[in-house]
Amino acid sequence: MSFERPDIIRPPSEWKSYFLPLTRGCSNNTCAFCGYYGSKLQMRDVADVKSEVDALALFTHSGIRLPSVSGVVYAVAREWDGKRMFLQDGDALVYPFPRLREVLQYLNDKLPGLERIGTYATPQDILRRSADELKELRQFKLGIFYTGLETGDDELLQKIGKGVNSDQVVEAGRKVKEARIVFSVTVILGLGGIEGSRKHVLETARVLTEIDPDYVGALTLTLVPATPLYEEWERNEFHPLSPFQSLEELTQIIENSNFTDCFFSSMHASNYLSVRGKLPQDKRRMLKQLEVVLQAKDPALLRPEFLRGL
Ligand code: SF4
């Protein structure tokens, strides 16, 4: 079966990147809220990846387009500054280590101007790699992992099918930091619904504090049709938060977590309000911003539902 190029789903901070698919789908396709639920993992041949890198290098250096290469390559490459690359898809770190090393080496050779390569990585992918393997990847400029913690509540992690507990995510974070790879962690506001909200925020703040990542991105739960959580909601068994309740969760997570040096943001398109800053130094300002909106309770201050994205 030929490899089907995935759509671009990326962290907000990777907007300047070139998107190079190594896989399609996600190896941990059991998360009850995620659009990758039930997806079939597909691995791309190294030769196919290399021919895209060749085409990209040719275009970047001399503007030459090859008729045999997908138009998507040139559509992205046209706007690209040659510095950052993002490996697709849901957890490209699952790509077998020897093949990943070969691709990274090739990228370094063909595109020497690259400054940083990033990827989504599940905690399982990270734990599967040895410390030496992670350090080797780092040497080839694989410099940032984006990993979903989603919640620090172990019961909720189990319920949503994350496949790891919070201790395992903490352990994965420790390995990433030891390899000097930047660690960016996402959490999902509203994931526990109304009934699970308090435990979700307190445990999430506890685990984030333990991980002490470089970046935290807060997302707001969006119910995706054909996922188990959506079906629970249809059966009236899952009770989502209101937009203002989700901002209360954001407030409590910021309030209760303690970081050494972390950039915390709710810039993702799924959120009702964008708050961002360095923690701990910007904590008061960020909490004040949230307090003003929560006191006014004016829907006009929020991102409208139709502008929210996944
Ligand atoms: S590990 Fe991440 S990408 Fe994969 S199904 Fe879970 S949330 Fe989705």
Image (cartoon, rainbow, N blue to C red):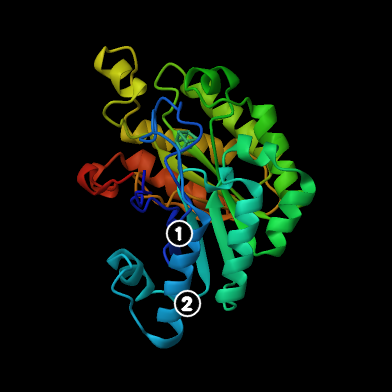
Image quadrant assignment for residue 100 = bottom right
Image quadrant assignment for residue 299 = top left
The reply to whether residue 34 is in sight is yes
Q: Residue at x 48, y 48 (%)?
A: 288
Identify the residue position indicated by label 1 in the image. 48
Q: Residue at x 52, y 25 (%)?
A: 200
Image quadrant assignment for residue 291 = top left
Residue 250 or 239: which is nearer the viewer? 239
Q: Nearer the viewer, mark 1 or mark 2?
A: 1
Q: Find residue 4 and report its horizontal and vertical position in percent.
A: 34, 49
Amino acid type, callout 2: Ala
Q: Find residue 134 and report its horizontal and vertical position in percent.
A: 72, 51
| Quarter of the figure with the C terminus | top left
Q: Mark 2: which secondary structure?
A: helix
| Quarter of the figure with the N terminus | top left
Residue 274 or 82: which is nearer the viewer? 82
Looking at the image, residue 115 sits to the left or right of residue 135; the answer is left
Identify the residue position indicated by label 2 in the image. 57
Q: Residues within 10 Å of mark 2 (few under 14, many from 20)?
A: some
Q: How many marks?
A: 2
Q: Is mark 1 within 8 Å of ligand 1?
A: no
Amino acid type, callout 1: Asp
Estimate the spatial distance between the alpha carbons at disc 1 and disc 2, rounded to whole Å: 14 Å
Q: Residue at x 33, y 51 (%)?
A: 7
137 shown above or below 43: below
Q: Find residue 210 and report its horizontal and vertical position in percent.
A: 71, 37
Q: Mark 1: which secondary structure?
A: helix
Looking at the image, residue 257 sits to the left or right of residue 66; the answer is right
